[in-house]
Image (spheres, rainbow, N blue to C red):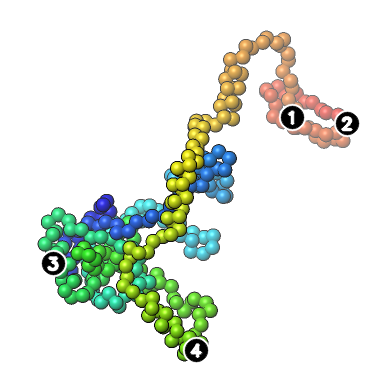
């Protein structure tokens, strides 16, 4: 397993070096989006809708939208400073409670906890104490710049840390619309429902449950592979930093520079017009070509 976090866990004066390992994994079958015509994977580019151009990573900043269309800018340096201030590589158990007191709605993600260097004895002590007392520990930890509440408990001879939501992260159940309240239930219907529940009640055996849809999709994919229905995406043409239009324009400019010059008969420079009073005729004005002022007038058509 890949170690995703190293630190320590403490309760009272006992400090235990630990390592965290993700206890679960996402097994969803990820499908790519392809171009129907050539079967090439589609790229998703970051485009500014105002400037109508693609933006690079260095052009991006973070902002919080406090009202519609208005943002507070927060720099990476400010976030890094806060992270450094709050990210301690330790898990402190604050309280011990009964697991039954925590509703499952609070649970988020599970991590296996393994002992760090020279932490075997203290690790075994905490595990044994939790098993004997039947309690779980309530702790706080910062993982990937996010401070989280967590519970520490024993699962199959291993300490497990499960992150849980803060109370204000759980939405108010009273906001759920159209929940029936005082509905009169027929006693016979209720007895029948309870009887059905009793008949279906058994011990929880997780191995008997499976994701039928995921297995069906995986089977379909394997069947198509076996039938040699695979396709190869066309390689996208390599593009240079300079686009085609710019390259063509540059080539034209170079050929202009190299083109032979032809001698033409010398002609007197054209006189440039200067400002003139409007007296029934249209006057045009411009800066003189040289120090000698020449006045020209254009007759009205």
Whole-Å distance between the Cαs marked 4 and 3? 54 Å
Q: Nearer the viewer, mark 1 or mark 2?
A: 2
Q: Quadrant of residue 80?
A: bottom left
Helix, strand or loop at mark 4: loop
Q: Is residue 93 visible?
A: yes
Whole-Å distance between the Cαs marked 3 and 2? 107 Å
Q: Is residue 20 left or right of residue 239?
A: left
Q: Quadrant of residue 104?
A: bottom left
Q: Please report contact status of discs 4 and 3: CB closer than 8 Å, yes or no.
A: no
Q: Please report contact status of discs 3 and 2: CB closer than 8 Å, yes or no.
A: no
Whole-Å distance between the Cαs marked 3 and 1? 100 Å
Mark 2 lies on residue:
301
154 above or below 144?
below
Whole-Å distance between the Cαs marked 1 and 2? 20 Å
Q: Nearer the viewer, mark 4 or mark 3?
A: 4
Q: Give me the disc on residue 186.
A: 4
Residue 168, position in %: x, y? 39, 72
Mark 1 or 4, nearer chain start: 4
Q: Is residue 12 visible?
A: no
Residue 127, position in %: x, y? 17, 67
Q: Nearer the viewer, residue 298 or 265?
A: 265
Mark 1 or 2, nearer chain start: 1
| Residue count near mark 1 (Cα–Cα under 10 Å), binned few <14, some 14–19, many ≥20 | some
| Residue count near mark 3 (Cα–Cα under 10 Å), binned few <14, some 14–19, many ≥20 | few
Q: Nearer the viewer, residue 267 or 26?
A: 26
Mark 4 or 3, nearer chain start: 3
274 above or below 145?
above
Helix, strand or loop at mark 2: loop
Q: Nearer the viewer, residue 26 or 245?
A: 26
Q: Give me the disc on residue 125.
A: 3
Q: Is residue 53 left or right of residue 171?
A: right
């Amino acid at each position: 397993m890949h170690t995703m976090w190293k630190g320590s866990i403490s309760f009272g004066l006992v400090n235990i070096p630990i390592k965290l390992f993700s206890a679960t994994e996402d097994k969803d079958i990820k499908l790519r989006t392809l171009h129907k015509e050539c079967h090439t994977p589609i790229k998703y580019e970051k485009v500014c809708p105002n400037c109508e151009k693609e933006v690079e990573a260095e052009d991006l900043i973070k902002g919080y939208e406090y009202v519609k269309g208005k943002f507070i800018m927060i720099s990476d340096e400010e976030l890094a400073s806060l992270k450094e201030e709050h990210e301690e590589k330790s898990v402190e158990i604050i309280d011990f409670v009964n697991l039954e007191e925590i509703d499952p709605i609070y649970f988020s993600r599970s991590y296996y906890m393994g002992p760090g260097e020279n932490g075997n004895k203290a690790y075994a002590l905490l595990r044994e104490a939790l098993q004997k007392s039947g309690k779980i520990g309530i702790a706080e930890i910062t993982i990937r710049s996010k401070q989280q509440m967590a519970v520490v408990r024993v699962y199959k001879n291993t300490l497990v840390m499960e992150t849980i939501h803060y109370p204000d992260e759980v939405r108010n159940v009273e906001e759920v619309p159209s929940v029936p309240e005082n509905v009169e239930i027929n006693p016979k219907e209720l007895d029948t429902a309870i009887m059905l529940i009793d008949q279906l009640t058994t011990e929880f055996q997780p191995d008997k449950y499976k994701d039928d849809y995921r297995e069906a999709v995986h089977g379909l994919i394997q069947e198509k592979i076996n039938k040699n229905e695979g396709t190869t995406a066309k390689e996208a043409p390599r593009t240079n930093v300079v686009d085609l239009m710019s390259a063509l324009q540059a080539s034209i400019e170079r050929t202009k520079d190299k083109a032979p010059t032809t001698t033409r008969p010398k002609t007197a420079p054209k006189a440039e017009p200067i400002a003139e009073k409007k007296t029934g005729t249209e006057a045009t004005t411009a800066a003189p070509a040289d120090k000698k002022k020449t006045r020209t007038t254009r007759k009205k058509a």
